[in-house]
Image (cartoon, rainbow, N blue to C red):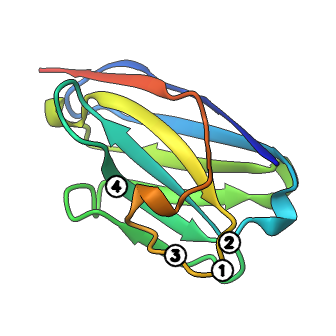
Amino acid sequence: QVQLVESGGGLVQAGGSLRLSCAHSGRTISINAMGWFRQAPGKEREFVAAITWRGGSAYYADSVKGRFTISRDNAKNTVYLQMNSLKPEDTAVYSCAATVSPTYSYRDYRFYDYWGQGTQVTVSS
């Protein structure tokens, strides 16, 4: 089992920044990748970013590329999502997720096995 706890959401003006954190615990040695997804009211869950566990490769949705950065701190057992130049369309509940599957598509939420509770990000215009 893997436990994930997000923090860092909040209200920010357009153009501002927020950093989300996802603390992971439990059987983290089995993790192959972690990702961030978001869901706005009335919309489907959307891939935001992912990072592989062994190589540390990062992947981003086109809509956030150049503005968001995913990173990890192994000493703190935490994955971060640094969000800069925020736009009102970034408003959503952001959730981190982990996959222990040996084969997966990092963009597809169905491949992720564990999820955090989500944190609200609201960007005002």
Quick check: 50 left or right of 32? Answer: left
Quick one: SS at disc 3?
A: loop
Pointer 3 and pointer 2: residues touching (CB < 8 Å)?
Answer: yes
Location of residue 3 by image quarter: top right
The answer for how far apart the CA atoms under marks 1 and 2 are is: 7 Å
Pointer 4 and pointer 2: residues touching (CB < 8 Å)?
Answer: no
Q: Nearer the viewer, mark 3 or mark 2?
A: 3
Q: Earlier in the sequence, mark 4 or mark 2?
A: 2
Residue 10 at x, y = what percent?
Answer: 43, 18
The answer for how far apart the CA atoms under marks 3 and 2 are is: 9 Å
Q: Which mark is residue 102?
A: 1
Pointer 1 and pointer 2: residues touching (CB < 8 Å)?
Answer: yes
Q: Residue at x 39, y 63 (%)?
A: 108
The answer for how far apart the CA atoms under marks 4 and 1 are is: 19 Å
Q: Residues within 10 Å of mark 1 (few under 14, many from 20)?
A: few
Q: Which residue is mark 2?
A: 32
Residue 53 at x, y = what percent?
Answer: 69, 72
Q: Image height check: is 76 above or below 91?
A: below
Q: Earlier in the sequence, mark 3 or mark 4?
A: 4
Q: Residues within 10 Å of mark 3 (few under 14, many from 20)?
A: some
Q: Image height check: is 107 above or below 75?
A: below
Q: Nearest the camera: 18 or 99?
A: 99
Quick one: SS at disc 2?
A: loop
Q: Nearest the camera: 63 or 30?
A: 30
| Amino acid type at image mark 3 | Tyr
